[in-house]
Amino acid sequence: MTHLSGTNSPSIGPDYIVATYRLVTRDKDLRKRAESIAVGLTVGSWTDLPAARQAQLKPYCGTVGETRILAEHQDGSILAEIEVGYPVRNLTPRIPALLTTVFGKLSMDGDIKLVGLRLPEAFVRQFPGPKFGVAGVRQRLGVEGRPLIMSIFKSCIGMPLDALVEHFTEQALGGVDLIKDDEIFFSEQLATPEARVAAYVRAAERVAGTTGRKVAYAVNLTGPTYELRDRARRLADLGAGALLFNVFAYGLDILQELAADPAIQVPIMAHPAVAGALYAAPRHGIAASIVLGQLLRLAGADIVIYPSPYGSVTLAKEEGAAVLGALRGPSPHKPCLPAPSAGIHPGMVPVLLRDFGTDFIVNAGGAIHGHPGGATAGGQAFVAAVQAAISGRPLREAAQASEPLAQAIARWGVAE
Amino acid sequence: MTHLSGTNSPSIGPDYIVATYRLVTRDKDLRKRAESIAVGLTVGSWTDLPAARQAQLKPYCGTVGETRILAEHQDGSILAEIEVGYPVRNLTPRIPALLTTVFGKLSMDGDIKLVGLRLPEAFVRQFPGPKFGVAGVRQRLGVEGRPLIMSIFKSCIGMPLDALVEHFTEQALGGVDLIKDDEIFFSEQLATPEARVAAYVRAAERVAGTTGRKVAYAVNLTGPTYELRDRARRLADLGAGALLFNVFAYGLDILQELAADPAIQVPIMAHPAVAGALYAAPRHGIAASIVLGQLLRLAGADIVIYPSPYGSVTLAKEEGAAVLGALRGPSPHKPCLPAPSAGIHPGMVPVLLRDFGTDFIVNAGGAIHGHPGGATAGGQAFVAAVQAAISGRPLREAAQASEPLAQAIARWGVAE
């Protein structure tokens, strides 16, 4: 968006966290609003303080950056952006401190959305970031030079362990790299996470005899917060390939704790469940690029599942690009492996490669389980599609040597 | 809202969690949408399953309740409500399981807001709820028959401990019952929470010699998640009167852990920071009554700070009433003590009593520190106002015997 008018202000110094807010207001004195935030959310008051106290508090006081009007509405209100700088010394390097400072009270202050967050590099470096990142996940899974392929359990809840193992095996036989739990799988009545990991590891070993590949299992890390760390270590020791974690249902600080724990030697896969409640509204909440991108990378997700630009549930195109930029753009931290999800079928793989390069996860549910030949054929179709796309061969040509791919294309077509 | 049209469906059984969603859609087949949610967020698929598997999964499958059209828009879209029931056996009694199930993926599914949540009583009973509740907090603080009075620190960040103690003492001398930290106070460079509690407890003892009342201190519980429990116990042992906790910046499950911990014998005060990012949007996110009411009580907040209906930052009147209903309406759990905040001055106390009864906290910042006579006089004005209002005496009459109250009324008036 270009701005209609605004103020140029001295740029905010390097030791400040700079938050950009987009707001709708009738009060056109944006600078005054920004100043009230800058003071109110740091030292509390300013103009009525004695000079000696002002001198003492100056290093802790917020500051105002640019303000700009983006649009003027017919009803007299304006759409505007304001920048506020918060001294980094006010915070500890944890997400709760960051969020409470830049969008604690403010989140309740009418039509206002947090749309940008610039963090000093020294502050960023105090967060763990991903323990494995793209290279680490690839190394653990033994997959180089191509996207990874992940299959999503279609059903988990209500299934006894033997049926789950059968379901797992069917997916594994397709040759996928990863199989992930349903994120809503919390009940432990029929099969605990520990029992699932143990059983699936054995199933994966059996399948490896056929496929030559040992598929990794992303187990849903569930339970009370103070048991998660021990459980994560235990599931890793049992052979879990990754930990699926509902970060936004639990809390970003818990992710940070898990990521920083050297005893948890397994990648963490962040699920976006509940995140839409934070990012999806146009004039409230926090931008998707911050929620699903910046914060997840800071806190240490290795793999990030988020809405693809292809499904019915989508992010706006530029929002999705901003998420991707935050996940793997320049940073002191390792890049996260993106898993854009929804609407993915084998005929989309060339488009996915064009849009995401090779460092991402082809994440599929419906097109695995809805494949005319079943879930095994569904996985095989993706494997064939990825092989073809990587070597630049047209899918329809590759389909001549792969019946599963041919069936998938007959069903869902090839995307342009 | 009355509904224009809808379907009456067999009521959903008692063992289901019933979520009500308000959505804007062009697809008028609401039943189909609800069915797809009911199946998709439980057993995953249904119509294509063999009969034996259907019989097995039936107890785990979601179900559809009422659907109704609330409004038809000129653009052809409708505002509608749908009810979906989720078998309680699918979940564990934890907030992450609840939120991920009823609003995990759905939160990202366009214009949809979670506006209602009916929980089976047996499920509710598995949550801790408030450890102290209204009666427990009253007993600990020795206040009966009148609202409690809380003063909010104006400045915390950047202040050395001696200045903080001075600031605390000034507030305590006014005779308030509680003094709370600024919720943005995370830095420990100048004064750790432990140092503050120790110093303020000594200050409170000194002040008690003058006022006859020992004020309680609500300390901001901060730090990494896996240190919070030990710190909470330590702060309680040091004499903290309450733990201020940024529940939404950390995670509701952490609140549940703290509330359920028998070793933490101190009330928990939930701050709504960041909650606006979840509840404030009209067509996305989760209703305030759920976020600030139902979930906080389930997870075990004893005191809940939330936007009052009086300040510039307000909840819609019916939203505020719904929050209050959730905090202290019928439930197997103890009631929470509400602390409606923003826009509170001494002249409002009779209105507060009319709107909230006696079981609430008069929570004031600006009217304490902005009092013409200073923070001590600010507290005294509130104490005088509460005494007068409780005994049914007009404030202006009471002000004849209280100079601080007279000054407050001259400044802010008396609300009707």
Image: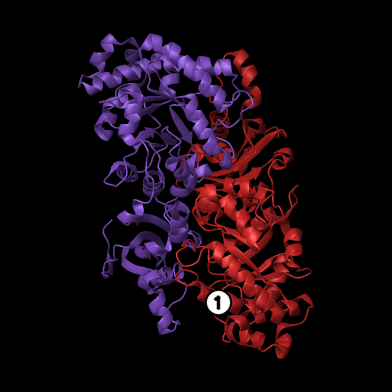
Chain colours: A purple, B red
Q: Extreme left residue here?
A: A392
Residue at 55% x, 26% y is A194
| Quarter of the image where one finds residue A210 | top left
Point out residue A175 in the picture as x, y percentages from the top left corner. 37, 16
Say what amino acid the circle numbered 1 marks. His
Give neighbour class at mark 1: few <14, some 14-19, many 20+ (Cα, 10 Å). Answer: some
Q: In the picture, which quadrant includes the C terminus of chain A?
A: top left
> How many numbered discs?
1
Point out residue A383 in the picture as x, y percentages from the top left corner. 32, 18
Residue at 35% x, 72% y is A31
Left or right: where B299 falls relative to A27: right
Point out residue B164 in the picture as x, y percentages from the top left corner. 53, 73
Left or right: where B172 falls relative to B353: left
Where A60 falls versus A187 (above or below)? below
Where B176 falls versus B21 (above or below)? below
Element assignment for label 1: helix
The answer to whether any part of residue A28 appears in the image is no
Q: In the picture, which quadrant includes the N terminus of chain A?
A: bottom left
Where A265 falls versus B314 (above or below)? above
| Quarter of the image where one finds residue B347 | bottom right
Q: Residue under circle 1?
A: B167
| Quarter of the image where one finds residue A410 | top left
